Amino acid sequence: MLIEMTIKGLMVDPVTNMPIVLLRDADNQRVLPIWVGPVEANAIALQVENVAPPRPMTHDLLRNLLTELGATLSRVVISDLRDSTFFAYLELRAGSDVYFVDARPSDALALCLRTRSPIFVDTQVLDRARSVETTTEEVTRERLQKWLESLDPEDLGYKM
């Protein structure tokens, strides 16, 4: 089953310092974080903030190509999560033909912002991402606990 989601915003992962795109559903019940590269995050941020670059960026070029060829981006689908990697595809329509084009989620999201197309996420992806988040949170909690245990009180500037 597919759930429609929108881009809630961008943030930086404090641990990895990598950009994260946050998707959310209409009811604010589900949030999906997707780690992206800095270049892709910039392309998304420019569009979110309505900043027009002086020359077309790659995603602007793709939108222009679709328009010139008479095709439309019907929707973006985040379709899978394998080995901590998200997979997506573009659903394109040209006349009565429908095309499914494999895409990185970051590129798909940057393009859907430019075409004002909807984003859908497979519920299995949401379920898998939740289990990965839980595992990651547990690892992070364990790491924090070990770090706290290894601290010397003098390092903190507090003496007992």
Image: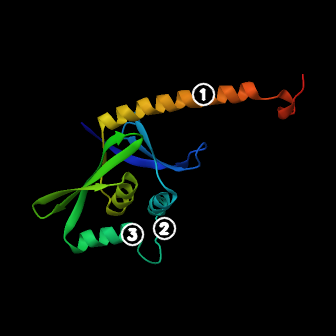
Q: Which mark is residue 51?
A: 2
Quadrant in the picture for residue 85: top left
Instruction: Tell me the kind of residue under disc 2.
Output: Val
Q: Nearer the viewer, residue 130 or 6?
A: 130
* Picture disc at residue 58: 3
Disc 1 designates what residue?
141
Q: Closer to the camera, 53 or 87?
A: 87
Q: How far from the left and from the top, in percent, is residue 49?
A: 49, 61
Residue 55 lies, in percent from the top left, at: 44, 77
**In the image, residue 76 lies at what x, y percent?**
29, 52
Q: Residues within 10 Å of mark 3 (few under 14, many from 20)?
A: few
Left or right: 11 with respect to 149? Answer: left
Cα–Cα span, label 3 and label 1? 39 Å
**Mark toward the viewer: 3 or 2:** 3
Indicate the amino acid at tag 3: Thr
| Label located before the other in sequence (3 or 2) | 2
Q: Are marks 3 and 2 in contact (CB under 8 Å)?
A: no
x, y percent for residue 64: 30, 72
The residue closer to the viewer here, 76 or 9, is 76
Specify the farthest residue to the right.
159
Neighbourhood count class around disc 2 (C-alpha, 10 Å): few under 14, some 14–19, many 20 upward: few
Q: Which mark is residue 66?
A: none
Left or right: where 97 falls relative to 156: left
